[in-house]
Amino acid sequence: MDEYNNRCMDIFIIDDEPITVQRLIQALRKDGYLVEGFVSAKDAMASMPKALPKVVIVDVRLKDADGIELMRQIKAICPEAAIIIITGYASIDHAVEATKKGAFHYLAKPLHLENLRAVVKDALEHVRENIRRSQIDKELKKCGSYGGIIGVSPAMRQIFRTIAQVAAVDCNVFIQGESGTGKELVARAIHANSLRAGFPFVSFNCGAFTEDLVANELFGHEKGAFTGAATTKLGLLETANGGTVFLDEVGEMPLSMQVKFLRVLQERAFLRVGGVRLIDLDVRFISATNRDIVKMIDAGAFRQDLFYRLKVVMIEIPPLRERPEDIRPLVNHFVDKAGRKFNKTITSVSSEFLAPLEVYPFPGNVRELENIVERAVALSRGKILGPNDLPPDIFCVAKDPGVLRAEGYTLKHLEQDHILSIYQRTGYNQSETAKILGISRTTLWRRLRELNLLDKPDHKA
């Protein structure tokens, strides 16, 4: 399918009237299409296996073939091709027959070029969309992955389909999911499969800077805008022009900055700090948060109008504990990745290694699983990963799978117990705890606040 998509020819024209062929070739080439024309079906079919055209415009009555029957032969070579039937003998019966046999459209002679152009444009988009869908299905059947994201669960398969659909539409996307679920991977997959793929993908963490620094990093500044601004600096938005900007932890953006950013989205232009000249902006925004954005809006912590601007399409990534069928393929993927990193060969993963992971709540989600597997590969002395290669904490939480079903004791409780266990073991060191859990310090801080553990007198940053 990739080979078919990458071949150079857009359109074949088959008509036994040389004047018609030349007229259509000239018109469509002016529109930027790669076009080849034929006055015989024999010559066209001989060239078709090499060129694999995406659209075929064929006369229903040819000197050496019947156009309706020729459709079957074309489909055998180019199953994804859109076929446009043209004829000077238009009739309802012909149109019905052609459509039943797979024609994309039916046009009567004399052809109106504007009508033909519109049909050709729709046909090419139809073919491209079918190719995208086929590629997704092919990748899923092959290895349960898409765009570098691993998953075989129904939830992840649906996300893969959504990625493919939204990638083709140049709209803003909002991704919601817990820390470590792979929100940036989803954003990168959307960018990589979009028409902006040849332009920059720029990631920006909205929670890592003060308001002044957020403005400076996003918008850049003019020379002399403030003390120390010795030269003009381009902001991330300017360097990303034509591409995609990924706003990570967008829920952490200060309210006053949200107002400025909303104006940028509305006007599709911005000023550098200290600047007076508007700079046009052509980017797609993909935003992400691990917070409940609806609750934030209700609490007045996030602007509803900004949310609606950013959320043309919403993608919610479920936590790993809700899709245990993804654990095995993820483990296999991370074992291969860690093996290359540490130059070690792991030939297999035992069921005893997998069993505790399949009942573990994973507060750090996929990122935590990767850390667990990477540690196991790094410290393993053999070629088969077994239970001794897992950290002891896994067994403390997962030693009794029945606890997951105990009345009144939820996965939330397990998660809290595990965080507290690690936090105590590190001597209340937040940096070390976050590293072990595979989550950011910002996320850990919020979890500790929920557990009322921030007032520990001896906690360490």
Image: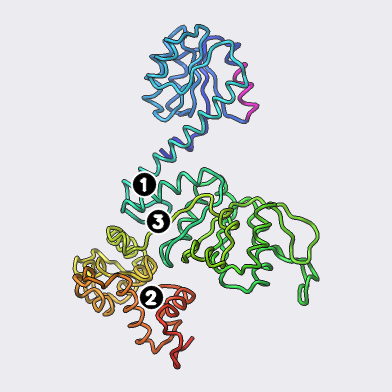
Ranked by sequence position, the earlier of labels 2 and 3 is 3
Which is closer to the viewer, label 2 or label 1?
2
SS at mark 3? Answer: strand
The relative height of residue 107 versus residue 223 in the rendered view (above or below) is above
Q: Nearer the viewer, mark 2 or mark 3?
A: 2
Which tag, 3 or 1, sits closer to the chain's start? 1
Q: Quick check: can you spot residue 384?
A: no
Residue 308: image location, x then y, percent: 56, 54
Task: Check the image and name the residue furthest to the front.
Answer: 298
Q: Amino acid at mark 2?
A: Leu
Q: Please name the residue shown 39% across and 89% down the image.
A: 427
Looking at the rendering, the stretch of residues picked out in magenta corresponds to 23-31
Question: Which residue is located at x 34 percent, y 68 percent?
Answer: 369
Query: Pointer 2 and pointer 1: residues touching (CB < 8 Å)?
Result: no
Residue 93, position in %: x, y?
A: 42, 10
Against 430, residue 126 (above or below) is: above
Residue 261 on the magenta span: no
Q: Which mark is residue 149?
A: 3
User: Is residue 313 among what the camera can see?
Assistant: yes
Using a 10 Å C-alpha cutoff, classify the residue at mark 2 as few (fewer than 14 neighbours), some (14 to 19) or many (20 or more): many
State the CA–CA distance, disc 2 to disc 3. 21 Å
Q: Which residue is mark 1?
A: 139
Alpha carbons under labels 3 and 1: distance apart:
11 Å
Q: Quadrant of residue 357?
A: bottom left
Quarter of the image with the N terminus is top left
Determine whether the residue tagged by mark 1 lies in a helix, strand or loop: helix
User: Of the residues under marks 2 and 1, which one precedes in the sequence?
Assistant: 1
Q: Nearer the viewer, residue 388 or 358?
A: 358
Q: Observer-nearest residue: 245 or 333? A: 245
Which residue is depicted at the point 41% across and 55% down?
Answer: 148
Identify residue for label 2.
Answer: 437
Mark 3 neighbour density, 10 Å: few (under 14) some (14–19) many (20 or more)? some
